Image (spheres, grey):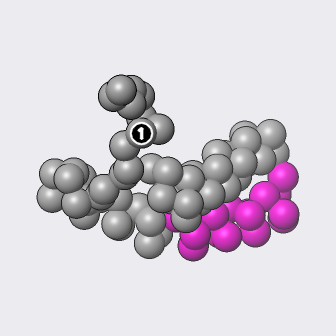
Amino acid sequence: MKKRGFKGRSYNPYLLPPWLRKTRFFCKQIIIPITVFQGLRTLFLPTTGDFLFLLLLALLCYLFITDFI
């Protein structure tokens, strides 16, 4: 019986187009410094928008680190 859905396939980033691999690599390298900067900014000037943006960046950090994206 054939497996269906994403769970049966493994993820291989080398199957992506070269421009998408380069963009993903660049985003993976730059997301942590941007998140730290936003965290410091939220610490000193807390607003609702900054806090929500920090949560979004933290989620993206987690997804890049676990290779989900």
Give the quarter of the figure containing the N terminus: top left
Q: Residue at x 80, y 40 (%)?
A: 48
Q: Residue furthest front?
A: 1
Q: Residues within 10 Å of mark 1 (few under 14, many from 20)?
A: few
Name the residue nearer the viewer: 44 or 16: 16
Magenta stretch holds residue 6: no
Q: Residue at x 67, y 70 (%)?
A: 36
Q: Which residues fall within the magenta stretch?
A: 31-46
- Which image quadrant for residue 5? top left
Magenta stretch holds residue 40: yes
Name the residue nearer the viewer: 34 or 18: 18
Q: Residue at x 34, y 66 (%)?
A: 25
Left-right relation of 57 to 13: right
The image shows residue 3 at horizontal and vertical percentages of 38, 31
The image shows residue 23 at horizontal and vertical percentages of 29, 58
Q: Residue at x 78, y 58 (%)?
A: 42
| Residue at image mark 1 | 8
- Residue type (three-letter) at the residue carrying disc 1: Gly
- Which image quadrant for residue 47? top right
